[in-house]
Amino acid sequence: MFTGIVEERGTVRAASTGRLEVGCRTVPGDARVGDSVGVDGVCLTVVDRGEDRLAFDVAPETLRRTTLGDLAQGDHVNLERPVTLATRLGGHLVQGHVDGVGEITSMEAEGDGARMTVRVPEGLGRYLVEKGSVTVDGVSLTVAAVLADGFASALIPHTLEATGLGSKGVGARVNLEMDLIAKYVERLTRGER
């Protein structure tokens, strides 16, 4: 379980079919083999580590359903360690289970920050509510507006600087995780077992 508060931007050292190695300084500090780490919003298991790097095996299913298969050496990724019972929940409940890949349709300066709009895959828009939560590449964001084919979100300067969203442009593919509570409420109201 994560919060969507990015701790560090890592740099991809190697990305091949089934393996991802990321250079980073903060997250490896207490990460052990077998631990979960959020990588651009995808929950991955640490399989090897060093003082300034983490390595992950990436399943074909994960490559099909996320943007991790698009990564190349030198790309930046958002990293977050899992929440603990002693951690403040600064974002929202995030599992690291990507629901779909969206596309940034606009990124416009707004004050010192930006307003980003994202197109979501068909069927995921029902989980969006104004002032609700959504995760984009592992970043917990507030939905500023629900649109016919997606949503808009206001990005503050810190988010633009501390995460990879500041370097993304129109047409960029992004990992989306919809609000966990909304998904449970939907299932409960349908009366499904």
Image (spheres, rainbow, N blue to C red):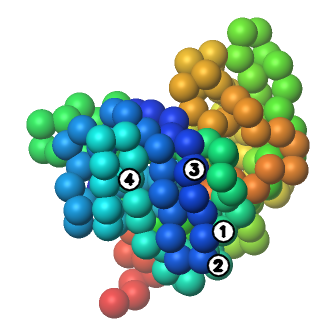
Separation of marks 2 and 4 at Cα, in angstroms: 22 Å
- Residue wearing tag 4: 54
Separation of marks 3 and 1 at Cα, in angstroms: 12 Å
Residue drawn 70% across and 29% down? 166
139 or 133, which is in the foreground?
139
In the rendered image of this protein, does residue 82 appear above or below residue 115? below
Tell me which numbered mark, 4 or 3, is placed earlier along the sequence: 3
- For the residues bearing labels 4 and 3, Cβ distance under 8 angstroms: no
Tell me which numbered mark, 2 or 4, is placed earlier along the sequence: 4
In the rendered image of this protein, does residue 112 appear above or below residue 163? above
Residue 133 on image: x %, y %: 51, 44
- For the residues bearing labels 2 and 1, Cβ distance under 8 angstroms: yes
Q: Residue furthest left?
A: 86
- Dot 1 crowding, Cα within 10 Å, few <14, some 14–19, many 20+: some
- Residue 114 left/right relative to 13: right
Separation of marks 4 and 3 at Cα, in angstroms: 10 Å
Residue drawn 64% across and 25% down? 160
Q: What residue type is labelled 3?
A: Val
Q: Which amino acid does label 1 sit on?
A: Gly
The mark found on residue 12 in the picture is 3
Q: Which of marks 3 and 1 is in front?
A: 3
Occupied quadrant, residue 83: top left
Q: Is mark 2 on a helix, strand or loop?
A: helix
The mark found on residue 69 in the picture is 1
- Dot 3 crowding, Cα within 10 Å, few <14, some 14–19, many 20+: many
The mark found on residue 64 in the picture is 2
The mark found on residue 109 in the picture is none
Q: Nearer the viewer, mark 2 or mark 4?
A: 4
